[in-house]
Amino acid sequence: MKKILLGTSAVALSSMVATSANAAKWELNWGGFFEAYVGFVTVDGDGDFDGVDVRQDSEIIFKPKITLDNGLQFGADIQLEGNTGGDQIDESFIFVKGSFGEVLIGSENSAGYKMTFAAPDVTALGVNSGSISAYINVGSNQFRAPGRSSFVEVDGNLVNDSQRITYFTPRFAGFQLGASYARDAEQDTFAPVDLDSNLGNIFDFGVNYVNSFGGVDVAVSGRYGIGESNDAVTPAVAAVPGVFQDAAGNLVAAAAAPAGSTQIVAPVAADPGGAQIVDGDPEVYAIGINLGFAGFTVGGSFAQEDGGLVANDGEFFDVGVSYATGPWAASVTYANSDIDATGELDQFIAGVTYKLGPGVKAGLTAAYIEQDSARAAAGGSNHEEAFIIETGFTLNF
C-alpha cells in the first residue's frame, strides 16, 4: 500500500512540475482604466437636468497569452465592466497571432470599427464616446446611440461586440487590411437567432495606412460594412381614413360599411415618432484621417449609414486639433450627427489634461451641446442647448 501511495504521489508531483513548467510560459497580464469626473451642466430646454453630478467609467481587462515554440501567439481578452450594467462582460475573445497576421474569435468590435481614425480628442468626455448622455438626454428615442460616431456599427450600433470572426493582415508598406463576419447581432454565444426575421450575415471591411514623411505622421482609414435586414422590424402602418373592406373584399366608404368590415391600413412613408421602418439592407461607409507634426495632430472622420431601420439612416462627421508637450495635452473638437428620421446633434468639446505620473492623468473639459430632434424625447424638448464643465482623473493601469 505504501509503495502504491508513494508511486501515486510521485505521479502527482511530476504532474505538478509539468503544470508549473507550462504555466511559466503564460503571461498572465491584466490592466484596465478608471475614469471619475465631477461635472456641472446647465440645460436650456424641458426637464430639470441642471446641477452637479459624478460621471465614472471603468473596466478590468484580463489578457493572458502564450507564445509557442513555433512562434504562434495565442491569447484571450476579457473585459469586465467596473460599473453594474446589462453588458457586464464588455468584450471577450480569443486571438491568434503569427506571420500570417491576426485572427480574433468571439465577442468583439468589427474590423472596420477597430481600424477607423477619427478627430483627435484628449478629453475623457469625447465626441465619439457617448459620455455626454450622462448630462443631457440624448436617448435612443432621439438618436440611435448617443450622438452617433464615426465608429458606428452596421444598423446603428446594434451589433457592437457581437460574436464574430475577424482577420487582420500583417502591415505591409504602411497598409493593413481587416475583415469581419458575424452571423447575427447577438453578443451571447448561446443565443440561436432565426435569420428569417432578424439582422444577419454582417460583413465589415477596413483598411488603413500609417507612415511618416519628413517629420509628418500620416494615418488614413476607410471602411465598409453591410448586413442582411430580413424584415427585422414590421413596417409601421396607419389606418386610411374613411376606407373599409367588406367581407367580399370590396372597398367601401365608412358610412356604407356593413357589419364585419375592416378598416384599410397602409405602410407609413415616414414615422418620426418611432421610425421603425425597414428600407433595405443596412450599409455603413466611413473614412478618417490624422496628420501629426511638431506635437500637433489634426484630423477628422465621416461616416454614413443607409438602409436597415429608417431610424438609423444618417451621417456623422468630426474635426479637431490637439497639441501635446511634456505632460500637457489639449484639444478642440467638433462633431455633427444628423439622423434623417430623428434629428441633429452638435458637439463642441475642448479640454486640457496633465499627466501627474505613470497612468495618472488629471483633466478639465468644457462642452457646448445643441440638439434639434424631430420630436420631443421623454423629459426633453425639440430644441435643447447644454453647457458642461467637468474635472477629474483618469487612471490607466
Image (spheres, rainbow, N blue to C red):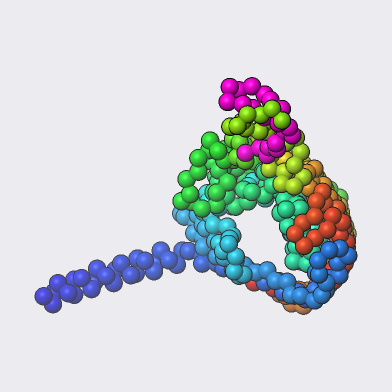
| Residue at the (74%, 75%) spot, across then down | 54
- In magenta, the rendered stretch is 234-254
Let me know if residue 258 is in the magenta part: no
Q: Nearer the viewer, residue 110 or 245?
A: 245
Q: Is residue 40 above or below residue 61?
A: below
The x, y position of residue 90, in whole percent, is 59, 60
Q: Give the residue drawn at x 40%, y 66%.
A: 21
- Residue 14 versus residue 285 in the image, above or below: below
Q: Could you say where residue 258 lies in the image, as x and y percent from the top left?
A: 63, 29
The answer to whether residue 332 is left or right of residue 154 is right
- State the image coordinates of residue 392 (x, y, percent, origin top left): 77, 76
Which x, y percent locates residue 81? 60, 66
Residue at (29% x, 68% y) in the render:
14
Q: Residue at x 86, y 63 (%)?
A: 45
* 321 horizontally vs 64: left or right: right
Which of the two residues, 375 or 173, is positioned nearer the viewer here?
A: 375
Residue 200, picture quadrant: top right
* Left or right placement of residue 272 versus residue 232 in this view: right
Does the magenta portion include 250?
yes
